[in-house]
């Protein structure tokens, strides 16, 4: 894979629940992480005293985060509504030259900030809330 432009990593939100995904406007920085918990099955009989893990048994999760400036009242309002209503709508994450991750996420944090002579900014944190699908590009 060759070097990629960071602005091409997009977080998209299903605005209507009908599969109409729209990029969350104003994001300047985005991040996605994937995690898988381990299940330790080490016993006194483990070869050489090495730890043994049970494959495929741990809980998988993903986290999203983004920060940016206010640009689009539509996506800003929808993100606020999702947070305050505790909804878990579908999001899409477009990872350039890699693929698209899609599934339900919950907005777990919204931060707003601004300085006296600067722009108002926000940060979003999201946690996966169900099974995610991956489609290779």
Image: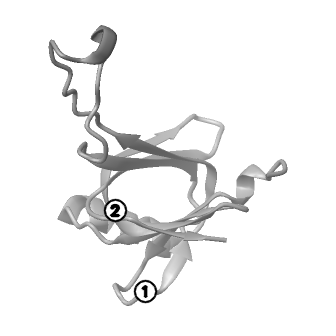
Q: Quadrant of residue 118?
A: top right
- SS under mark 2: helix
- Depth order, front residue of 22/49: 49
Q: CA distance from mark 1 to mark 2?
A: 19 Å
Q: Is residue 39 above or below residue 27?
A: above
Q: Identify the residue at image location x=28%, y=31%.
A: 53
Q: Identify the residue at image location x=28%, y=9%.
A: 49
Is any atom of residue 118 visible in this view? yes
Question: Dot 2: few (<14), some (14–19), or many (≥20) neighbours within 10 Å?
Answer: few
In the rendered image, residue 47, in percent from the top left (x then y), is placed at: 30, 16
Q: Is residue 1 above or below residue 77?
A: above
Q: Nearer the viewer, mark 1 or mark 2?
A: 1
Q: Is residue 101 above or below residue 107?
A: below
Residue on which the image places disc 1: 19
Horizontally, is 60 left or right of 6 in the view? left
- Depth order, front residue of 125/25: 125
Is any atom of residue 125 visible in this view? no
Residue on which the image places disc 2: 80
């Amino acid at each position: 894979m060759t070097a990629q432009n960071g602005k091409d990593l997009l977080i998209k939100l299903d605005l209507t629940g009908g599969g109409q995904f729209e990029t969350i406007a104003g994001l300047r920085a985005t991040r996605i992480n994937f995690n898988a918990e381990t299940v330790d099955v080490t016993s006194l009989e483990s070869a050489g005293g090495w730890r043994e893990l049970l494959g495929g048994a741990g809980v998988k999760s993903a986290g999203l985060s983004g920060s940016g400036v206010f640009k689009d009242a539509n996506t800003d309002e929808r993100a606020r509504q999702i947070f305050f209503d505790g909804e878990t709508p579908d999001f899409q994450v477009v990872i350039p030259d890699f693929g698209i991750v899609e599934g339900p996420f919950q907005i777990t944090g919204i931060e707003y900030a601004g300085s006296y002579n600067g722009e108002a900014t926000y940060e979003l944190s999201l946690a996966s809330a169900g099974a995610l699908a991956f489609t290779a590009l």
